Image (spheres, rainbow, N blue to C red):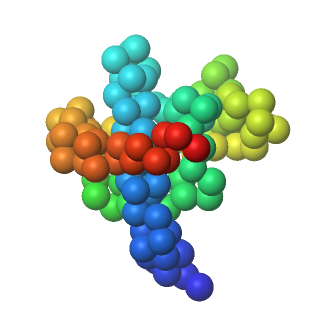
Amino acid sequence: MTNHDATDQQITWDPKKFMRAQVELVKAGLKQLDAGIDHFGPDDIDEDLTFGNIMGSATRSLRIAHVIRHCGLDDPFQGIHHGARISKRKSAKGRPVKLYSLCSRGAALAFLKRHEEEARPLQRELAV
């Protein structure tokens, strides 16, 4: 199975979860940018939100759409090497995460305007 096949299956079987992952990632990027930090990773999303193994496909789709890009940052003083860092989450147990930057604030805001409402959890999902 190719990456494209896996992404298609994830979108087909759980499109809302896939879109929520993308929306939360873009929100994390904007939050970091507002704090004066031009890079972010999936570990900047609230730890209460979990997306399973969808995040890789979600970031790939956002990169293809030119909403985010790999940051390519290398700053050993911040623990960043070749655009990745050790996850901030204890639950990740030292796993590296790739870092991204927004292609532009305008693209990020346009993405959220178009998709944020459809990414809201359904009421029955909130009750679980």
Q: Residue at x 19, y 47 (%)?
A: 114
In the picture, measured across the screen, residue 118 lies left or right of residue 99, that is left
In the depicted view, which residue is nearer to us: 63 or 89?
Answer: 89
Quadrant (top left/top right/bottom left/bottom right) for the N terminus: bottom right
Q: Is residue 103 visible?
A: no
- Residue visible at 46% across and 64% down? 14
- Residue sitting nearer the eye, 106 or 27: 27
Q: Nearer the viewer, residue 21 or 78?
A: 21
Vertical placement of 79 versus 17: above or below? above
Residue at image location 55% in from the left, 29% down from the top: 46
Residue at (37, 33) in percent of width and height: 27
Percent coordinates x, y for residue 24 in the rendering? 42, 39
Image coordinates of residue 51 in percent, x first then y, are: 57, 50
**Closest to the observer, 103 or 114:** 114
Residue projecting furthest to the right:
93
When asked about the image quadrant of residue 11, the answer is bottom left
Asked if residue 36 lies left or right of residue 81, the reply is: left
Q: Position of residue 74 (x, y in %)?
A: 58, 34
Quadrant holding the C terminus: top right
The image quarter containing residue 64 is bottom left
